[in-house]
Image (cartoon, rainbow, N blue to C red):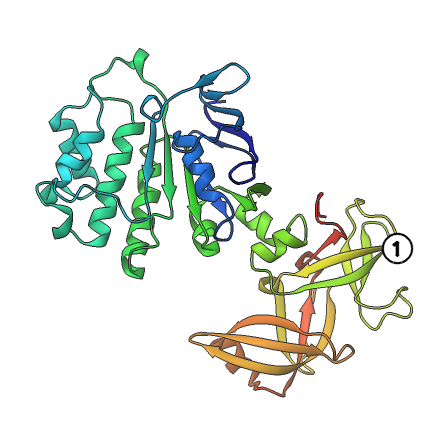
Amino acid sequence: MHGLQVQLQSNSPIRLEAEFDCGAGELVALVGPSGSGKTSMLRAIAGLWTPPDMQGHIRVAAQDWLNTAAGVQLTPQQRRAGLVFQHYALFPHMTALANVALAAGPGWSEADVQALLSRLGLATLAERRPAHLSGGQQQRVALARALVRVMPEPQAPVSQALAGVLLLDEPFSAVDAPTRQTLYRELAALRQKVTVPMVLVTHDLAEARRLADRVVIVDAGQTLQIGAPARVFASPRNARVAELVGIQNHFAGRFFKDSQGWGRLCWTGSDPLDAKIALKVVDKNKIDDDTPVTWVLNGEQVDVMADGAVLEVVEAEATRLRCRLAEVLLLGEISLCTLVPEDLPDQCITLNLTTRVLDRLQAAAGAWVQLLIAPGALHIMPVREVGDGV
């Protein structure tokens, strides 16, 4: 594989059980709460965190950076890892050019470093010190410093070019929103030119969804699920992943097989006949008939209609659910809405609705609305904390 492969275990000083890969030109985001081990994984790749009981391997292209079984452990200086820190970590007494040149190998000339700064929009700022740079400019300098570690040296023979990895430790969290959007665009453009594996640490789900090809959900030092953002966020492997990816609608129920390819999800009750609400779901033949499950509802795939509305085109397999709009919390253009099903008044569904949708519905707190729930909006999981979801 022309990329990064990581497989690590450690029990001290913190537990770590990580396994993931990142292809050349791919961006993988490590997502999880504070203290989950994301940054420790990044530092382990760079060789900055090496607990005595660490076992496993880190391989970049054909080179082992760590292979405990073979007794291989490269120093941080021997690893072509470019690490971008959250708070830049620039030397305050050095210019932007000097900060970048310090990390450059012997195959980089001053003209090469100047050319890289120019590509990142820093040509006119090369002689400024960090105190005279904005947050966004400092982050670009930090990125340039990381890139000279991972890009092939311009003056080196092609046969001697070594693969590197770009490691990004929450690099956008310290800048304001407009600057963050600019840096997002610049990173996307950079990926078209620099085809090295990139690993991003973030706790921002929207950022991971926007930037990453794949996400790795991390909790308590373990990698819980890996996949495309849309897939992981819509189909979490288990209840803990559902919680970590911010799914608000998480319930218990019971699954029953129905006609071929379909199943019935009973929100309450032990049988579809006595269930107050039974939702039609896709049966992927991974869960047995009459099985207790946990399930999540993807609010982005739920249609909300005025009570009594008649639609000309309705998905045949969708379930209609009459709900009372119990609470509307205005959060700018988005309102956090709590809906209580008519047939299950002790349960509630949370949806983020735009002002435009609420205006169309002419609905305020206390009004009745109809939810149209397609089978694809539902994701069911066996009642256990590990194992695959469905």
Q: Is residue 70 above or below residue 45?
A: above
Given the image, on which type of amino acid does mark 1 rest?
A: Asp
Q: Is residue 12 visible?
A: yes
Residue 342 point in image, percent of width and height: 75, 80
- Residue displayed at 42% across by 47% down: 211
- Which type of secondary structure does the marked residue at label 1 adopt? loop
Q: Is residue 253 above or below residue 335?
A: above
Image check: 198 left or right of 269? Answer: left
Q: Dot 1, how many residues are within 10 Å of its Cα: few (below 14), some (14-19), or many (20+)?
A: some
Q: Nearer the viewer, residue 255 or 245?
A: 245
For residue 109, side relative to residue 71 (left or right): left
> On the rendered structure, is 83 left or right of 201?
left
Q: With respect to residue 48, does 240 lie above or below?
A: below
**In the rendered image, is residue 311 in sight?**
no
Residue pointed to by mark 1: 290
Between 29 and 178, the residue placed more toward the observer is: 29
Going 74% across and 78% down the picture, which residue do you hit?
A: 346
Q: Residue 216 appears at what percent x and percent y?
A: 53, 42
Tell me where residue 270 sits by quadrant. bottom right
Q: Residue at x 46, y 17 (%)?
A: 72
Q: Does 250 appear above or below 193?
A: below
Q: Position of residue 133 (x, y in %)?
A: 15, 51
The total number of labels drawn is 1
Q: Report x, y in % for residue 325.
A: 63, 82
